[in-house]
Image (cartoon, rainbow, N blue to C red):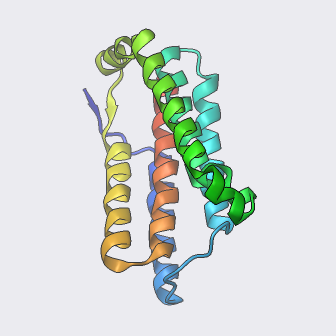
Amino acid sequence: MLDFKFYKENFLIILSLIASVIFIKIFNLETIEENTLLENLQLVALLGGFFVSIKTKNHKTFFTFLAMLFLLMFAREISYGRVFVDESVVQFNKKLCHILVGIYIGIGVLYALIKKIWVDIIDMIKNIKFPFWTFLIAVLCVLIQIISEKTLHNSCVEETVEFMLYCSMVVLALIYKKK
């Protein structure tokens, strides 16, 4: 049940990743500032995944849960709103933020359990071929991101690969939405 079709979106992700890494190496970029174009593009990709998921009519339980995950990742990218407030407010509300995020995650897990998300997942596994190359690209993005953060200490590569990961997640959501 593997789908070895190489979707055009996969080609775009790989091409963008290669071009970005070459650009980073040519200009010897190592760090990236907060709230730059690249980080804003990550937010756009996550919002795209959220809207794809929320508008999907089939396997509603799975895609609603996926939308909740995209929303959580979006919130994490903006540091749960801390980027919009003064630093003194951030220190005061850190514990409250952790509590609210924990409650949100708890609600998501409870939703998945009550709505029996595994029914949708099993049905999708049985009826839809698994997009091998798109998943492999996502896994490679995670590995490159970990290496760039832990070994290379290059936030440019890390943020670029993170953006590509988010794009591949949206592509996966689109593939499952269409099928």
Q: Residue at x 58, y 53 (%)?
A: 77
Q: Quadrant of residue 140?
A: bottom left
Q: Position of residue 76 (x, y in %)?
A: 56, 49
Which quadrant would residue 68 be assigned to in this image? Answer: top right
Residue in front for this viewpoint, 96 or 18: 96
Q: Position of residue 7 (x, y in %)?
A: 44, 44
Q: Who's the residue at 52% across and 85% down the image?
A: 29
Q: Nearer the viewer, residue 98 or 151?
A: 98
Q: In the image, residue 164 lies at what x, y percent?
A: 49, 57
Q: Is residue 58 visible?
A: yes
Q: How many marks?
A: 0
Using the image, determine if residue 162 lies above or below residue 55: below
Rendered image quadrant of residue 104: top right
Q: Is residue 109 above or below residue 119?
A: below
Residue at 51% over, 66% down: 160
Left or right of 64 in this view: 128: left
Which quarter of the rendering shows the N terminus?
Answer: top left
Q: Residue furthest front?
A: 92
Left or right: residue 37 compared with residue 126: right
Q: Residue at x 45, y 63 (%)?
A: 161
Which is nearer the eye, 106 or 46? 106
